[in-house]
Amino acid sequence: MVKPLNKASGVTSGTTLAGGGKLTPEQSDRFITTVIENSTFLKKVQHYKMASPERYIEMLNIGKRMFRKAGEGETPADSASVSTDRRKLSTVEIILPIDISYSFLEDNIEKTKAEQTILDAIAKQFANDTEDLGWNGDESNENDFVKINNGWLAISRADSKTNKVDLTAVPDSPMKIMKAMLDAMPEKFKTKDIEFVCSSEFKDAYIEELTARNTALGDKALTEAADIRYKGYLLNPRPYLSMYDIMLANPLNIAYGVQRDVSIEFVKNPRKRMIEYTITARTDYEYAIAEAIVVTTGTPAAKIPVEGSEDPVIS
């Protein structure tokens, strides 16, 4: 028998989990906020709390050199225009099943503390799976998790407006790969806020490439590796990415949408000595401006010696 969630209770405030069903808008907002706070990357992107399954994202696409000289009584010979990019979030229903053993609850004397621990675990798992699917989601894949929805990599690789770097034509060198990605980014989007979202493996390979140069810059990579940059742009490693899955973008250009209709239900299973929780929500992934995205495709053909006069920046 499914128990309803007490709609008067808070979602992350340590109050009772007894109850069930759809959360109130306030509870949903708190749950969604807690999920986002559990991911350092989700905190950086644009997130939309949606009231319905669909929402359009509209963004002004700012150009360059749009100033015109003012002349009294004169109309500029040509005028610049600001284009509007319009993309759509269309949420997909997902469920998160979590089983909690009777012994866990029995071993926790403070029931409220145990419930808060459960809620924290639910929010953390929801955050982990949200970002994992955000990067690896691909509806053409056969894996049950991956095929739930298209994530940022699949969407950007299928989009003719994004900028692609074919790694089969680039040497297997992190510096060469990042240089090719920077070259592919339109100048008007090369702001200080863009970053290389990559794997820890790629970041480590970059550090190894630097240290192999036997320079002061390489020494700094070893001793001050907390904030690694290439030509001033941050490398932001995420645990869900593979070696050659790299995106160059401003995180604020990346979007995550979640519908407010979140439900948390549970059913007791005495035979298994478990309480089965099911969290249901609707989510989707997008970005605002396709031209401000650079994404890799393929894998490099060959490794090359670490040489050259490039001067990446670590700070």
Image: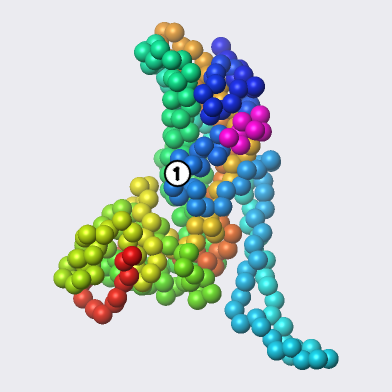
Give the magenta part as a residue range: 24-30
Residue at 21% x, 67% y is: 218
Q: Position of residue 274 (x, y in %)?
A: 42, 14
Q: Secondary structure at mark 1?
A: loop
Q: Amino acid at mark 1?
A: Ser
Check disc 1: other Cα within 10 Å, few if <14, some if 14-19, many if 20+: some
Which residue bears the numbered disc 1?
39
Query: What residue is shown at x 60% (from left), y 22% (from top)?
Result: 9
Compared across the picture, whether 36 is left or right of 232 comes to: right
> Measured along the vertical axis of the image, is residue 71 above or below residue 149?
below
Q: Is residue 206 left or right of residue 61?
A: left
Q: Is residue 26 magenta?
A: yes
Task: State which quadrant residue 58 falls in.
Answer: bottom right
Residue 259 in the image: above or below residue 65: above
Residue 170 appears in the figure = no
Between 64 and 280, which is closer to the camera in this rendering?
64
